[in-house]
Amino acid sequence: MSAAGLEVGTQTLTDRPTPRRRLGPREWAVIGVGGLALVSVLRVVTGADDIASSGALAAAIGLAVPIGLAGLGGLWSERAGVVNIGLEGMMILGTWGAGFFGYHLGPWAGVLGAVLMGVLGGLIHAIATVTFGVDHIVSGVALNIVGLGVAKYLAARFFTGLPGGGPTQSPPIKGLPAFTLPGVSDGLGTVEKKNWFFVSDVAAVLRAMCTNISVLTIIAVLLFVGTWWVLWRSAFGLRLRSVGESPVAAETLGVNVLRYKFLAVLISGGLAGLGGGFLAIVAANIYRDGQTGGRGYIGLAAMIFGNWRPGGLLTGAALFGYTDAVQLRGGATVHAFLLLFAVLLIAVGVWQVVRNRRLVQGVLALVVGGLVGWWYLAADAVPAELTGTTPYVTTLLVLAFASQRLRMPMADGQIYRKGEGH
């Protein structure tokens, strides 16, 4: 069976509507430059220089990688039609695997151990959903609970009594290599300190990307590129995506649907586990209980924001990682973004009323935007109790605004039995 024949057959039998035009690399580049210019304006207006500093952006990269890897795992699974709510549990298993193998055998063994533990979580999810037809949401939620419990038990069993270890953490793990471009980083730092509009912000971004970058971050970027090539430029990827769009049509054309679903969920678990391993080895050099902090769920949200495509997912992970890094800088830094949120909400409200004639949605956005603007003018900082909610509020807002352009794989979440295509 040829790849071309499969594509024709799949498109004929799915009878799906014409999709909206997708954003290409040029459009995403324009969005990125526009977003940076917006942040630069916000920095100048509010005086919050830390929102675009290389330190904050470097922290954003470190926080975006595990979110991106979890989302990439969700993309592989859901492109094959299996909803993977269990990404959080797979990440938790990955953190323990990184801590155990990293301490006993070294950091690279920790990376492999994180992947293997994630694959184990994926295996459980695949057996439940693909083999036995358990509801995908039920299986994923159960896996999150089981993963948390298993990691707690294994930590108490294997880390207690070790030097620096205990029931809630592992002994310290040796770090992976990190790279800095000599000369370039210092030169960009000099430009950044000038506080020039936009130019210094570009320098800060470039400096964050070439200063103390972990080798695992580079591997994560290559995994994004590899995922795009495999899923959208190879016959294997075409067959896997066809399983998520119309498994009946795929099976009639000779595709082993269950095998592709099973393999996709295993890859999904491995990527999520690698995200957990990044947290344990790179971000903290130690396994800790509760280390994932819900990043598996945020990764799932980043995947949905990215419309189940690697480029959009990478953008979503960068956005959520950035907001997470900003909230770590304190309430004064988050306070500057209240002005941005107010302006954006008012602009959306005007657009809904004038252009789309949606009075209720427009008025609601205008009212909320006005309240946020009042909050910005009336306070000097965001209370510490609310600062930590920044990444989660951003997740909800982004998904709310992006919901109208989303299109999941048509057979995503459906239970499939072998032979339904005959």
Image (cartoon, rainbow, N blue to C red):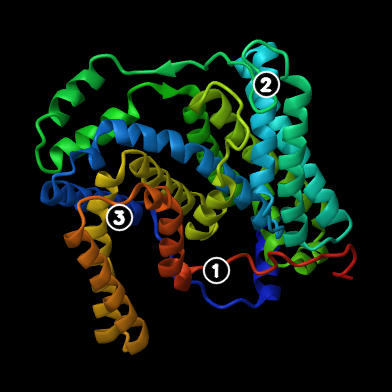
In this image, 234 relative to 306: left or right?
right
The amino acid sitting under disc 1 is: Arg
Distance between the alpha carbons at the discs numbered 3 and 1: 21 Å
Asked whether disc 3 touches disc 1, contact meaning CB atoms under 8 Å apart, the reply is: no
Q: Quadrant of the N terminus?
A: bottom right
Residue 334 versus residue 103 in the image, above or below:
below
Residue located 23% across and 38% down the image:
50
Residue 216: percent from left, percent from top = 52, 26
Q: Quadrant of residue 180?
A: top left
In this image, 63 relative to 335: left or right?
right
Q: Earlier in the sequence, mark 3 or mark 1?
A: 3
Secondary-structure class at tag 2: loop
Residue located 56% across and 41% down the image:
69
The amino acid sitting under disc 2 is: Gly
Residue 208: percent from left, percent from top = 31, 30
**Residue matched to label 2:** 166
Secondary-structure class at tag 3: helix
Secondary-structure class at tag 1: loop
Nearest to the observer: residue 9 or residue 303: 303
Q: Point out the frontmost of discs 2 and 1.
A: 2
- 10 Å neighbourhood of mark 2: few (<14), some, or many (≥20)? some
